[in-house]
């Protein structure tokens, strides 16, 4: 170990004490952190001062990241990297500096991953893995880099790949006897199972992880996932609200440690319970707060999905109170979400937003009268491409089960709404074409159940010698949501 000044050694001890308090959820960590920062300012020896700066930068970045301030977090880490560079030029021990730099690179990757700069996060992980052979514990450094890579794959919605990475890491951590890291890997594995639609497996893995929980952050992640799994129960099943309550209570108790992301998730969890229990005004208030949290955090996808959820509660409040301003607010929320999703390569969510907007218009104008005819016709024109696209994506065998299930659920709702609107507006041809689309889909699903592997939706359907079923909405779906044009020859309708 380098012969650093006593003040630098004391800074290290103070930060270790602050870290223990932070992990336990004790806000008293601020005391030793402030003492360490003040002491570091008085260190005269340059090498000792830079050692202290590196450690303080790593600690302070974690606090900034928890509060959603990625710029400040990255600035602290850049200061730490600069100090490490100066230490290298002084000729200090390479293995210890490689260790510090690898930790700092992985910390940068987590911050970048949190603001959806996934390619940059992956580059930092690659740098950490290249440093691993020269660190004090090469195998552990490499595993830390790979668990960061699994988290990035999960954030990229590559759920089967994330699941496989976490499963491999869990086995390695178990063999190495590293129980804290094993708990992290198991929670990641459970999250991946859940997103792959493997809910029973997710619950089993969580049961294995629970006895290993070592800090408030792991406990928060575990409780959040249990609450999420309860949200996925069918509408006719009563969820175990205790999971919702335990997560919300945990975040309230340790919000000074867990940070803005958990606070936003806890708000959404509480809102989900309130909304499911028909306490729509309480749900709307909590979701508006979650929207504000997501705006501050700067996570565009999280903000878009939170806006969509908030719009549902806002629309329900509008219908209950016959409040036109709340109805307009709900429409405004889905339109804002749509603009964001257009830049995030989220075509399924984009189509679901178009169906949602059309459904709000149909709910607000339940009858076809001269005053509502133009609005309802616009709703139909918006709903039809979404229905066609979602129906097609519900056959996507390469998609994970949750994504395919999302498409199938929203396709059913969108087709039903489109049929209802078309019928009420007197568009009999559109109703007939939607029936043909559903009939073809039922035939394909029946073939799949009989053992044929169908990786695509039915081909284009010929409604008449010179007409393809829903040709115009299909073209709109291609323009709005992307995807390859179906070049298969049309077949007669079922």
Image (spheres, helix red, strand yellow):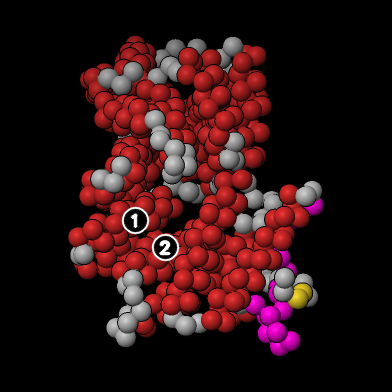
* Rendered image quadrant of residue 438: bottom right
At label 2, counting other C-alpha atoms closer than 10 Å, the crowd grade (few under 14, some 14-19, many 20 or more) is: many
Element type at mark 2 = helix
Front-lying residue, 398 or 429: 429
Q: Is residue 135 visible?
A: no
Q: Position of residue 385 (x, y in %)?
A: 54, 72
Name which residue lies at 42% across and 74% down.
Answer: 379
Q: Position of residue 249 (x, y in %)?
A: 28, 28
Q: Earlier in the sequence, mark 1 or mark 2?
A: 1
Question: Residue 356 bears which disc, if any?
Answer: 2
Please say if the residues under marks 1 and 2 sit with CB atoms less than 8 Å apart: yes
From the viewer's perspective, tell me whether residue 299 is left or right of residue 287: right
Q: In this picture, which residue range is highlighted in magenta?
A: 452-469
Can you identify the residue that label 1 sits on?
312
Q: Position of residue 97 (x, y in %)?
A: 52, 25
* Rendered image quadrant of residue 135: top right
Name which residue lies at 54% across and 19% down.
Answer: 208
Q: Quadrant of the C terminus?
A: bottom right
Give the mark count.
2
From the viewer's perspective, tell me whether residue 472 is left or right of residue 115: right
């Amino acid at each position: 170990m380098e012969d650093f000044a006593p003040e630098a050694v004391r800074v290290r001890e103070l930060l270790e004490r602050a870290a223990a308090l932070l992990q336990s959820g004790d806000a008293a960590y601020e005391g030793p952190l402030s003492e360490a920062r003040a002491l570091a300012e008085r260190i005269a020896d340059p090498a000792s001062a830079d050692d202290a700066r590196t450690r303080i930068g790593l600690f302070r970045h974690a606090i900034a990241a928890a509060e959603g301030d990625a710029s400040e977090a990255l600035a602290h880490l850049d200061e730490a990297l600069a100090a490490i560079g100066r230490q290298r030029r002084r000729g200090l021990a390479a293995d210890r500096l490689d260790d510090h730099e690898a930790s700092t690179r992985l910390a940068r990757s987590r911050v970048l991953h949190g603001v959806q700069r996934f390619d940059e996060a992956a580059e930092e992980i690659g740098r950490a893995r290249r440093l691993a052979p020269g660190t004090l514990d090469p195998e552990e450094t490499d595993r830390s880099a790979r668990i960061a890579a699994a988290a990035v794959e999960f954030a990229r919605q590559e759920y089967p790949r994330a699941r496989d990475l976490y499963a491999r890491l869990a086995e390695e951590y178990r063999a190495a006897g590293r129980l804290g890291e094993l708990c992290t890997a198991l929670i990641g594995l459970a999250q991946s199972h859940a997103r792959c639609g493997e809910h029973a497996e997710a619950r089993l893995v969580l049961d294995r992880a629970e006895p290993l929980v070592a800090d408030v952050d792991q406990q928060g992640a575990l409780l959040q996932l249990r609450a999420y799994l309860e949200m996925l129960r069918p509408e006719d099943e009563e969820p175990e609200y205790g999971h919702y309550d335990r997560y919300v209570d945990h975040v309230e108790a340790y919000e000074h440690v867990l940070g803005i992301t958990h606070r936003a998730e806890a708000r959404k969890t509480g809102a989900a319970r309130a909304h499911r229990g028909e306490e729509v005004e309480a749900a709307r208030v909590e979701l508006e707060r979650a929207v504000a949290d997501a705006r501050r955090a700067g996570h565009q996808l999280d903000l878009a999905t939170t806006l969509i959820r908030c719009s549902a509660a806002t629309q329900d409040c509008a219908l209950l109170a016959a409040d036109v301003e709340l109805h307009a607010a709900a429409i405004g929320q889905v339109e804002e979400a749509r603009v964001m999703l257009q830049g995030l390569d989220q075509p399924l969510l984009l189509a679901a937003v178009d169906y949602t907007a059309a459904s709000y218009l149909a709910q607000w104008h339940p009858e076809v009268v001269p005053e509502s005819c133009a609005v309802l016709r616009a709703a139909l024109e918006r709903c039809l491409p979404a229905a066609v696209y979602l129906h097609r994506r519900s056959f996507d065998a390469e998609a994970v089960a949750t994504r395919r299930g999302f498409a199938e659920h929203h396709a059913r709702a969108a087709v039903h709404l489109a049929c209802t609107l078309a019928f009420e507006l007197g568009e009999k041809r559109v109703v007939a074409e939607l029936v043909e689309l559903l009939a073809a889909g039922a035939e394909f699903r029946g073939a799949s159940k009989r053992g044929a592997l169908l990786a695509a939706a039915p081909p284009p359907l010929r409604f008449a010698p010179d007409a393809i079923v829903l040709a115009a909405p299909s073209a709109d779906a291609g323009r709005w949501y992307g995807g390859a044009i179906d070049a298969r020859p049309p077949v007669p309708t079922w």
